[in-house]
Amino acid sequence: MNFEPTDERRMLDDALRRLLAQHYGFAQRQHIAQSGEGHSEAMWRHLVDLGALGALFAEADGGLGGSGFDIALVFEALGGAMVLEPLLAALMAAAVLAEAKTDVQRALRRDIVAGSTLAVLAHAEPEARYEASHVTTCARPSDGGWLLDGLKCVVRHAEQADFFIVSARTSGRDSDSAGISLFVLPAATPGIVLRGYPLADGGRGADIAFEGVHLPADALVGTEGQAFPTIEGAVGAGVLALSAQALGAMESAKQLTLDYLRTREQFGQSIGSNQALQHRMVDLWLGIEQARSAVINAANALQSADRVTRERALSAAKATTGRVGTRVAEECIQMHGGIGMTWELPLSHLAKGLVLTNHMLGDEDHHLARYVSLGRD
């Protein structure tokens, strides 16, 4: 199979990288990261207008692409610039609304794809340990609707969201894949309590408590108790996006280190002439190319009808980028020396981003175990 990008993807990649180079430099990125909002509304509009958001969705959904390769292309570019805007949130929110059966929910999905409304998926819980089927937030029938109680954690962009899409258990035990439902509700719904905080790699997240939140019957997305495949699909798209994002960050860290080795002089010559450092850089390059191959494989498998093939490829990509990304962060900082950890250089922020990305939607250990487990099924 030919994995070379199409002309349309090359043009989008070039345009996106030019936009980020001109308007998302390190100083600008740091200003956005330290802002109260955690992302820039102006930059969000630029990304939407350029088509970066639309590229994540199929034409039938109002987008411009929607394949795994489109998602990987966009997020690799975003990862290299450490972009904080909520494209991942939009991708996953629109994915879980694919089963929307009401006109209101379908209209909300169109607005998410168009970038005019921000919705976030609130699914992770404190004791879930990355297991997508572990849901203790509960929803029970009440007064012709639903009563929602529970806690969701580390929900990025929650403070700026217009809508939450919440997973809740309507039947079964805590870790059963059956019995999970999805509900969509405005962020201003009474009974919702947010605790916001800054994140280690910049931007903001929040824990969301639902305390006796009353929802109308039409807040239910899809069929009651059958939301797990939809959630797994959204998480899969997110895993691919994060793997590509890590790949972009690795490339940026590698290039920064190469530039430093070429320009930093010691005893009258660049330190890059040291053969030991050259060997270390070659090892990093090999690791990054291995990670790239895993991301390409996952992008190719994203739309596979065979669940095991798809999920194993996604877990392999996440485990590989987690392992290689951690090593790239450590090696690049070591080759820079103490200056590599200073706040003023982007390398330390890339390193933090790589470590945090490893832990989002499942770390290396989780996905390695999942890869093995899926192979036994």
Image (cartoon, grey):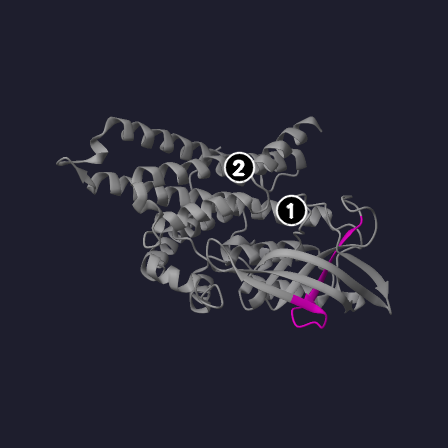
Tell me, yes or no, whether the highlighted magenta stretch contains residue 80: no
Give how far across and how far down residue 176 sits, in percent. 78, 43
For label 1, count other residues whose C-alpha is less than 10 Å away and answer few (under 14), some (14-19) or many (20+): many
Give the amino acid type for the residue marked by disc 1 in the picture: Gly
1 left or right, relative to 141: left
SS assignment at label 2: helix
Give how far across and how far down residue 323 sits, in percent. 49, 35
SS assignment at label 1: helix
16 left or right, relative to 374: left
290 left or right, relative to 285: right
Q: Assign the magenta stretch its main secondary structure.
A: strand
Give how far across and how far down residue 157 sits, in percent. 55, 62
Q: Residue at x 74, y 59 (%)?
A: 150
Residue for badge 1: 233
Residue for badge 2: 317
What is the tally of numbered marks visible in this picture?
A: 2
Q: Magenta stretch? A: 179-193
Give the amino acid type for the residue marked by disc 2 in the picture: Ala
Q: Is residue 149 visible?
A: yes
Up/down of 300 relative to 10, above or below: above
Q: Is residue 6 visible?
A: no
Is label 2 or label 1 in front? 2
